[in-house]
Image: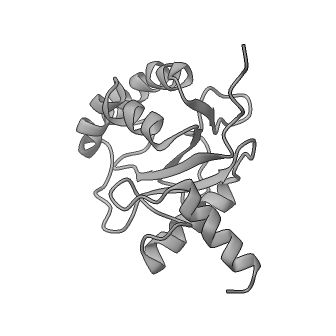
Amino acid sequence: MTSTPPAAAHLAQLNVATLLHPFDDPRVAPFVEMLDPVNAAADGTPGFVWRLVEEGAADATGLRPAGEDVIVNLSVWETREALWDFAYRSGHLEVVRRRREWFERHVEAHLVLWWIPAGHIPTVGEALERLAELRTHGPSPRAFTFASSYTAAEADGLRTAQARGL
């Protein structure tokens, strides 16, 4: 029996959400109550690789690198399909459906996807740079969305062209 070699690339994702109320406000409590079960579901989803967690905490909601009222979710997945299945075909969908109860409507991109070498763990700074790139320049193989997706091969082709000075 032979094993399948590891994938050359994984998909990183960042999404940001601006709270309508302070995190400890009772109006946000239903969201807070969903965090542990949704995070546990993500951790157990086929294709899940990693998610950002604040040191000493179960999640990243205490980290505020994008602003005092902005929470971040940063994770890595083996494939676009694995992330899509978790986001839109699991209990996570309930959070998506109810997001207007807890978060402001974003007028600019709030989700960014990009390919990373397998084994690389993206930093929050790297993720925020990709989001800024998407907001400034629109979708590209370096920063895209589900609706404007690129393959790992397209991202690798861009990296190769940039390395050659093309």
Name the residue rendered at 52%, 51% in the picture.
Answer: 14
- Give the residue displayed 58% in from the left and 48% down from the top: 12
In the picture, the quarter occupied by the C terminus is bottom right
User: Where does residue 110 sit, x and y in percent of width and height?
Assistant: 41, 58
Q: Residue furthest top?
A: 1
- Picture quadrant of residue 22: top left
Q: How is the image coloured?
A: one colour
Q: Residue furthest front?
A: 1
Placement of 45 over or under 82, stated as above or below: above
- In this rendering, position of residue 31 left or right of residue 130: left
How far from the left and from the top, in percent, is residue 70?
Answer: 48, 53
Total labels drawn = 0
Q: Quadrant of residue 78?
A: top right
Quarter holding the N terminus? top right
Q: Position of residue 42 (x, y in %)?
A: 50, 26
Q: Residue at x 68, y 61 (%)?
A: 125
Please tell me which residue lies in front, 142 or 16: 142
Is residue 66 or residue 160 the one in the foreground?
160
Percent coordinates x, y for residue 81 in the rendering? 43, 38
| Side of 51 relative to 83 (left or right) | right
